[in-house]
Image (cartoon, helix red, strand yellow):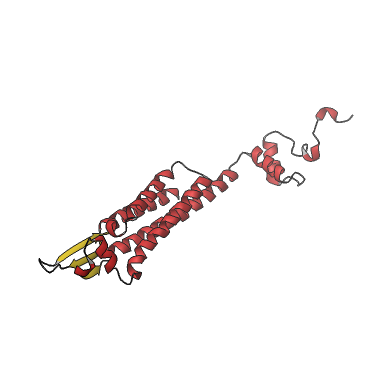
Amino acid sequence: MMRIAQVLLVAAALALWGASRMSWVQVSSFDGLGQPKNTVLTGAMWSTALIPLALVVLAAAVAVLAVRGWLLRLLALLVAVASAGMGYLGISLWVAKDVAVRAADLALVPVAQLTGTHQYYGGAVLTLVAAVCALAGAVLLMRSASGARAVASRYAAPGARRAAAQGENADAPMSERMIWDALDEGHDPTGGQNGEQSDPDNKGR
């Protein structure tokens, strides 16, 4: 499961890198002297957070190899927040009513010389794909963190299981499995209950 999460995070990073190199907005301008000019704004120019987000998820994919437990949960939350940021960047290109002023500012074109803008949605779609991959990876990381804890408890040594169970409820009777574990270890499963120790030398006295 963690391996799949790593693949998804790497895929998200690659998708963001690809989106940063694609054309997002084209700015058309004319200064009244020369020929009309077209300036293309790439994803890295339009949304400067694409590359940092790609680095975040790529670093998370590597960090998965070194963290466990609550650190893995924290990493999953960080990736989930990053995926929300990716989704915002992708959707913002659609919901923006007018990109002309911002596009002219990024293209260093005076608004008075602006003749039109054209939006390309391929990079935004790729950014949304990256967001979905990152979110799926975050979910898998969270499930892996919870699953690892359950597996560790399941495969704990019989003595550790018995000690943990007795620590949680010292007055409760031992379960059948705990009794068999004690017998396998050569201990009397009934001798330690209620503070009484079994001593063969005391029998008959």
At 35% across and 63% down in the image, what residue appears? 90
Confirm whether residue 136 shows in the render. no
**In this view, 164 is above or below 13:** above
Q: Is residue 84 above or below residue 74?
A: below
Would you say residue 113 is visible in this rendering?
A: yes
Image quadrant where residue 49 sits: bottom left
Residue furthest to the right in view is 205
129 w.r.t. 168: above or below: below
As drawn, which residue projects farthest toward the left? 34
At x 17%, y 65%, the residue is: 38
Q: Is residue 27 above or below residue 195?
A: below
Does residue 73 appear to the left or right of 157 in the view shown?
left
- Quarter of the image where one finds residue 106: bottom left
The image position of residue 19, as x and y in percent, is 29, 58
Q: Nearer the viewer, residue 113 or 87?
A: 113
User: x, y (%) of residue 203?
Assistant: 85, 31
The residue nearer to you, when weighing 115 against 125, is 115
Identify which residue is drawn at 68% across, 45% down.
177
Provide residue 64's location: percent of width, then percent of height: 44, 45
- In this figure, what is the number of numbered marks? 0
Q: Position of residue 114 (x, y in %)?
A: 21, 69
Q: Name the residue located 23 percent from the left edge and 69 percent from the top edge.
A: 117
Q: Residue furthest top?
A: 201
Image position of 134 (left or right of 74): left
| Residue 129 falls in image quadrant | bottom left
Give the quadrant of the C terminus: top right
